[in-house]
């Protein structure tokens, strides 16, 4: 399999970052679709790493580097879609995501920070570091889902 | 608005890259959902840059840097979802995406290359470079949609 890795200096924005500005006027249904898209892709790229972590797939440092980098970017994308105008849209989001903004932001920040550490270890091809960084990523996913997503 | 830009060395994979390997067994409906999610997010982050390019919004180099970087990553995400097993799924994809693989790959490569140039110019805060690089990105989107997506 061809794996062409390009080393690029990439700037990523933290929660509440610049993209929010241009989205203020997006329609609620579009915002929900976009935030769900980010979650869908987080699942796409987290899944294979998770399979490697539990030994269900052989460890592949190239796959981990790519997927973790995507995750690091994707972890920053959903949050500006969780705005009050979307509360009437069909979604699994619990009201707490809108009513407890501080706790929601902390949960989002936790994912961003955990995926940044995972990404750094993955790009350094540091398997031990990846294994150490994976738990906090999975924990951040689960914590946010437990508190802010309906079963 | 807070814009915390983190300079991170990020490795991105080209078409046919590493993530494909771990996806070979994904269900067709999941693959379609994932590739559509990538397109949805490309629209989210391209739109604001497009608005700036045509003067409908003020140029904001920070927003452009973030959005173009996301785009550069997102441009690499859809392609491994266009596999033969998905041909029976509900989708706007034309059969040509599966029957003319060489042309489809060329169209995908064009987007990856164009977004990489846009991302580099955007992160360098080079507005002239961004303006020069935007056209090829828009053209790559339109070309692929014309050839491989139903209206």
Image (spheres, coloured by chain):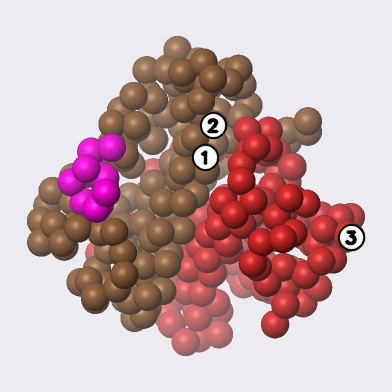
Chain colours: A red, B brown
Q: Which residue is mark 3?
A: A100
Is residue A133 found left or right of B94 in the rendered image?
Answer: right
- Disc 1 crowd, CA 10 A, few/some/many (<14, 14-19, 20+): many
Q: Which residue is mark 2?
A: B48
Q: Which residue is mark 1?
A: B45
Q: Is there any visible trace of residue B136 in the rendered image?
A: yes
Q: Main secondary structure of the magenta part?
A: helix
Picture disc at residue B63:
none
Is residue A45 found left or right of B106 in the rendered image?
Answer: right
Q: Residue at point 81% right, 54% down?
A: A105
Per the rendered image, the range of residues in magenta is: B142-151
- Disc 2 crowd, CA 10 A, few/some/many (<14, 14-19, 20+): many
Relative to B117, say whether A62 is above or below: below
Q: Residue at point 41% right, 51% down?
A: B39
Residue B30: x and y, percent? 41, 74
Q: Nearer the viewer, residue A31 or B121?
A: A31
Residue B20 is one of the magenta-drawn residues: no
């Amino acid at each position: 399999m061809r794996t062409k890795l390009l080393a690029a200096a990439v700037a990523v924005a933290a929660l509440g970052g610049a993209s929010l500005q241009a989205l203020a006027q997006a329609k609620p249904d579009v915002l929900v679709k976009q935030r769900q898209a980010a979650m869908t892709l987080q699942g796409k790229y987290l899944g294979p790493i998770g399979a490697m972590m539990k030994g269900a797939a052989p460890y592949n440092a190239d796959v981990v580097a790519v997927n973790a980098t995507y995750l690091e970017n994707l972890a920053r994308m959903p949050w500006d879609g969780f705005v009050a105008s979307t509360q009437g849209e069909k979604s699994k989001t619990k009201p707490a995501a809108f009513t407890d903004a501080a706790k929601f932001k902390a949960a989002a920040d936790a994912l961003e920070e955990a995926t940044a550490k995972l990404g750094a270890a993955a790009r350094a091809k540091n398997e031990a570091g990846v294994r150490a960084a994976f738990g906090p990523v999975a924990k951040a996913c689960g914590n946010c889902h437990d508190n802010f997503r309906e079963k």
